[in-house]
Image (cartoon, grey):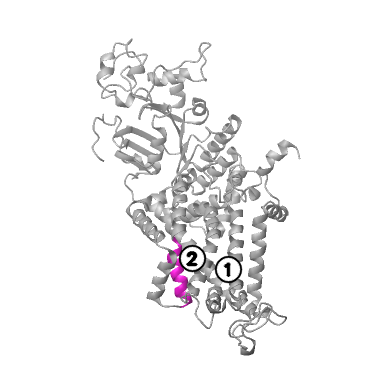
Amino acid sequence: MKPRPHEPPSTTPRKAADATSDTTLDIRGLRVAFGDAAVVEGLDLTVRRGEILALVGESGSGKSVTARAAMGLLPPGARITGGSIALDGEDLVGLPPRRMDRIRGGRVAMLFQQPRAMLDPTATVRDQVAEPLWLHRGLSHREARRRVTGLLRDVGIPEPERRARSYAYQLSGGMAQRVMIAAALAGEPGLLIADEPTTALDVTVQAQILRLLKRRQRESGMSVLLITHDLGIVATTADRVAVMYAGRIVEDGPVAEIFDAPRHPYTQALLRASLLRTEADRLYTIPGSATRARELRRGCRFRPRCPVAEGMGVAHSCENEEPTLSSCGSGHRSRCWVRPSGAVGA
Amino acid sequence: MTLTERAAAPARLPAAGARFTLALRRVRGQRWPVLAGGAVFVAVVLVLLLTPWIAPFDPAAQDLTQRLAGPNAEHWLGTDHLGRDVLSRLMHGGRFSVTIAAITLLLSALVGTLVGAFSARVGGLVDEVLMRVVDLLIAIPDVVVALFLIAVLGTGHSTLIAALTIVGWTPFARLARGLALEINGRDFIEAAEALGCSRTFIVVRHVIPNAARPVTALGFLRFGHKLITVGGLSFIGLGVQPPDSDWGAMLLDAQPYMEQSTLLVLVPGLAIFVTALSVTLIGQGVEPRTDDRA
């Protein structure tokens, strides 16, 4: 692991042994930078085997960059400058491209936001869904193409035999996302990273796709990292949730815990600002913006927008030192100086 | 058909039986220059294919009693300075001209597209060097480079094809590279990467198919150019060699006698012109259509 400047150490050291047993993806101290500007810094994230972990945060918080780093598909100019990304105990950072090609689609697959743009306009559905079958599962061309029909049926596509012959422009958004799910699951990956898979779809289709994802996840026992900014999706779909702010995790824990008793002021504000909780007659908005949060040299990154810091008498700590991500309940961690009792943690 | 039905139509899948009707509609939807070009070219190809059976005379058979005859019942397009039948020579010569032009065109398109697409994918120094080579070759007229290569390699059909491919791949490489750069930025390339496709696989299976339509359009436009280059090299005696002859070689033979028989130069010249024009016209039907990408 490369040295990480201005970086608090990871808070809950776990034994190396369980990295292979019950965790699928284990990201430690990840730092991703565009040039000199770090968009993700000191990110710790664990996806356990067979769970759906939701990664939430506002636009620009670094959710998608984190997902792409895990896929080894960072956009040009972005580089991993620190930390490790372990998939089933194997560090993916710095793996040679050929090795990475075998992992992508085979052990970890990805869903994207714009399903129709993700399908090659010149190839049939059959050709695209068949690709991972012969790239990763060693099936013959003919055999792979034959199995596509079954895969399409598994994702609830009516008339799979006919749909297999169609092109992207002949599919609706929801249908295209089903095709992408079929392609992503064709390689039987242990981890599926879904980057806002339903954002571009309308609400009824959204629910169908999420139900499908959940059903396929239960059937295959794979883990899912679900990236979203929609807390409604988190509530209905995920087992655990990690909240991201300005390039790092500020709170994580089981969905019920976080929704019932959010610890971090940012999570509290997010929940108040969502349509899940209608408090008064108007929607709450978080004051300020996150755009300059990464420029803060020291202290808590949320402090400039934090409604709690001043009142709790911990402003000095907030100003000068960044809190660590520390435990505050069973499997529940929060990056804040303010502790549930109101006392100042250290 | 109501408005809503019409709007929904493109999303519907064609039933197996509707394929033919759809194909027919596609033909009918073309503009007339495309149809005319297609009809002429199909006719030319048919005649050239059937030449061994339908040509009235042996193209090499001389009849010195009938030198430079005008069109008559026996020799429809007259005879040349050795009394050979011009129509038969035109048909046999066309087989060389069109075949050589088509082969070199296909090779040029194939080589150019592969080089361009991979150059875009690999990038960096390789890309830079390849594109400067392309600039250099494009800056020098084709015939000059081909002349040089033939001088080095000697004459013959295969060297002619090799020389014309070496001068002909560059426009395809430049076009394919530009297209590939654009296609590489599209979302489905990222999706293919996420499924574990290697670079080579992506170029072959996703980039090139998406570049196919513009490349094909360029191919049709370049055919006339190829046909003229083949004819031009034969005309200066470096293309198809005797006893074989193509349209360019016929022009070369006819040139000293053009005052006695204008038809002798007019016929092969027109054959080159009409064939080149017909293919260029077909090319207009292959222009990128936006309605394919809904």
**Res A42 seen here:** no
Q: Residue A53 in the image: x percent, y percent?
A: 44, 33
Three-letter code for the amino acid on which mark 2 is drawn: Leu
- Residue B250 drawn in magenta: no
Q: Quadrant of the C terminus of chain B?
A: top right
Q: Give left or right: position of B279 versus A61.
A: right
Q: Quadrant of residue B83?
A: bottom right
Tag 1 subunit: B
Q: Residue at x 30, y 18 (%)?
A: A337
Other residues around mark 2 within 10 Å, as few (<14) / some (14–19) / many (≥20): some
- Residue B164 drawn in magenta: yes
Identify the residue position indicated by label 2 in the image: B107
Q: Is disc 2 on the same chain as disc 1?
A: yes
Tag 2 subunit: B
Instruction: Give the magenta range.
Output: B156-169
Q: Quadrant of the N terminus of chain B?
A: top right
Q: Residue at x 44, y 53 (%)?
A: B177
Q: How much space separates mark 1 and mark 2, taking CA atoms?
A: 21 Å
Q: Residue B51 in the image: x percent, y percent?
A: 64, 77
**Res A107 seen here:** yes
Label the magenta part by its dominant secondary structure: helix
Residue at the extreme right:
B1
Q: Residue at x 26, y 31 (%)?
A: A9
Q: Which one is earlier in the sequence, the residue at label 1 or at label 2?
A: 2
Residue A150's tag is none
Q: Residue A99 in the image: x percent, y percent?
A: 37, 52
Residue B272's tag is 1
Tag count: 2
Q: What secondary structure is marked by label 1? A: helix
The label nearer to you, 1 versus 2, is 1
Three-letter code for the amino acid on which mark 1 is drawn: Ile
